[in-house]
Image (cartoon, coloured by chain):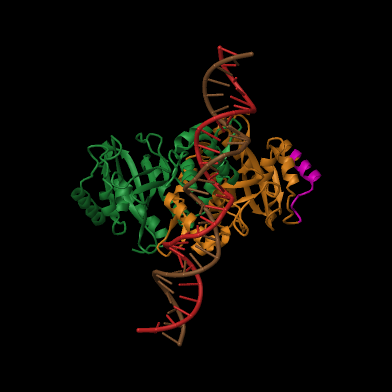
Chain colours: A orange, B green, C red, D brown
DNA sequence: ACCCCGGATTCCATCCAATGGAAACACCGC
DNA sequence: GCGGTGTTTCCATTGGATGGAATCCGGGGT
């Protein structure tokens, strides 16, 4: 038990709280970092210095800090996501060219979905999220595509976490979600209408690796008035199959 | 002073030593991490657990660890490198399509150069490096292009660090490097012949931001027998200017 | 030139979070 | 059942981490 009024977090937790302060990609002063990480100035000063010494953070001449290239270097070499993105690239570009909308590649990360690629046509519907974003599984097309084929227990964990109803179109009831998952598994396509963004729908298809496991999802987001146009579902289905084949899947 | 036989590193240094164990993108067991980070098993076990709890590392079912998506998410949102890569993308693809060789975008990182993009033609000369790699400034085309326009003191730091002679073609003598830097500034092109890879040469041009500061370099690596073909230097020069213009430079 | 303010940096008495060797556990192959 | 290897847990010990206070620094206003 820490002394009264003192921070109970471990050194590691404090270091990671500092890293979390940069989640939005901002450049921050030391005071801003301390505030976001909820640390005293002198502790923040010392621990930020450790990040800088390692290269995880970089200090600009004006005294602000930003994330250093070290973190990118550590992450970009991960073989599995590199193979995935390399395989997906031509398909995503085809979808972008043929639809002019938003085109994504996303993976499941615990109970969330993280966007690895985010390509946008010039006139695509406005969204508030971007590459690297993490959104809930239940409220996105890619999320539903990933949740439908997730390992046992993930669906239950989502339900237990109490999924949030962002818009009237967000499905949060367990029975409705189960039915939706079954429909996704049956059809191979997840369609999500105004679940996260008003005026937008998304359509997504799973991407499988050589073992048949669903490792990603590819999707298009478009204006809801284009909901009935069949080329979106067709496009993500073909893209999903093509990327899967490139990863060694044979189904 | 640490007790005899005990590790003098701070907790932060130990945590970062664990992260450094993953620099090559491998999946590692706990014992392998402990060995690379030079930590006792119980210390490694505890600190690796802290990385996993935060999401910086992920443990697979077979007990091996790899870098988690958290680090990628923190790094991918950095505005300046995203603008740079978005601006560079069409030019890099043009260079790839027109030359069929290796095409890179790199930035300076201290006394090294880090490759942000690495596109390779199917028949490109064999190299041992890849995206995310960090190589010395003096021994690469992009490195020389970046060093020539680096802030005061960087060149002196490179000399003080004792640049390594990888091949007979690697320039390491101070006078020769100074002359080379002057030539690069005059011509706007850095050519490096068999400085890092036998049988290969690279040609690079700087990329400037809106303020005119050199923030990156674009290059092509090709077989040394194609050294005299003029389209490589022309290509990187045009690409460098185009990317700079896209970033707001007017020169 | 001076003063004030806000942010950053340094100091250091205090003490408990971090330590790692040892023991126990788990798994696998023979 | 046993041995080997890797992982996990325990806990007596202690010095690295702590953060409030003091100091420093830079910029802006008068």
Query: Which residue reaches farthest left?
Result: B175
Residue A176 covered by magenta stretch: yes
Q: Main secondary structure of the magenta part?
A: helix
Count of numbered labels shown in the rendering: 0
Residue segment shown in magenta:
A168-182
Residue A238: image x %, image y %? 61, 38
Left or right: where B150 falls relative to B176 = right
Residue B89 seen:
no
Relative to B157, residue A250 above or below: above
Residue B46: image x %, image y %? 56, 40
Quadrant placement of the C terminus of chain A: top right
Q: Nearer the viewer, residue A244 or A128?
A: A128
Rendered residue at 76%/44% (across/down): A177
Residue B82: image x %, image y %? 48, 54
Residue A125: image x %, image y %? 62, 57
Q: Which of B202 and B75 is in front in this view?
A: B75
Rendered residue at 40%/55% (across/down): B243
Residue B121 seen:
yes
Residue B216 covered by magenta stretch: no
Left or right: where C12 falls relative to A205 = left
Relative to B88, residue B127 above or below: above
Rendered residue at 45%/37% (across/down): B38
């Amino acid at each position: 038990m820490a002394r009264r009024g003192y921070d109970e977090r471990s050194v590691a937790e404090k270091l990671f709280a500092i890293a979390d302060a940069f989640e939005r990609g901002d450049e921050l002063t030391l005071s801003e970092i301390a505030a976001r990480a909820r640390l005293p100035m002198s502790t923040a000063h010392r621990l930020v210095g450790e990040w800088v010494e390692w290269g995880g953070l970089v200090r600009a001449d004006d005294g602000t800090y930003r994330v250093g290239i070290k973190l990118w270097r550590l992450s970009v070499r991960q073989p599995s996501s590199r193979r995935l993105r390399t395989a997906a690239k031509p398909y995503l570009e085809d979808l972008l060219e043929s639809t002019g909308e938003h085109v994504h590649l996303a993976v499941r990360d615990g109970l969330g979905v993280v966007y690895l690629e985010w390509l946008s046509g010039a006139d695509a519907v406005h969204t508030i999220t971007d590459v690297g974003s993490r959104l809930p599984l239940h409220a996105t097309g890619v999320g539903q595509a990933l949740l439908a084929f997730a390992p046992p227990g993930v669906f239950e964990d989502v339900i237990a976490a109490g999924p949030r109803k962002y818009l009237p179109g967000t499905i949060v009831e367990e029975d409705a979600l189960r039915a939706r998952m079954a429909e996704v598994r049956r059809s191979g396509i997840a369609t999500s209408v105004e679940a996260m963004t008003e005026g937008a729908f998304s359509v997504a298809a799973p991407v499988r690796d050589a073992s048949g496991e669903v490792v990603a999802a590819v999707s298009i987001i478009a204006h809801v008035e284009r909901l009935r146009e069949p080329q979106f579902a067709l496009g993500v289905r073909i893209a999903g199959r093509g990327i899967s084949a490139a990863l060694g899947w044979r189904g």
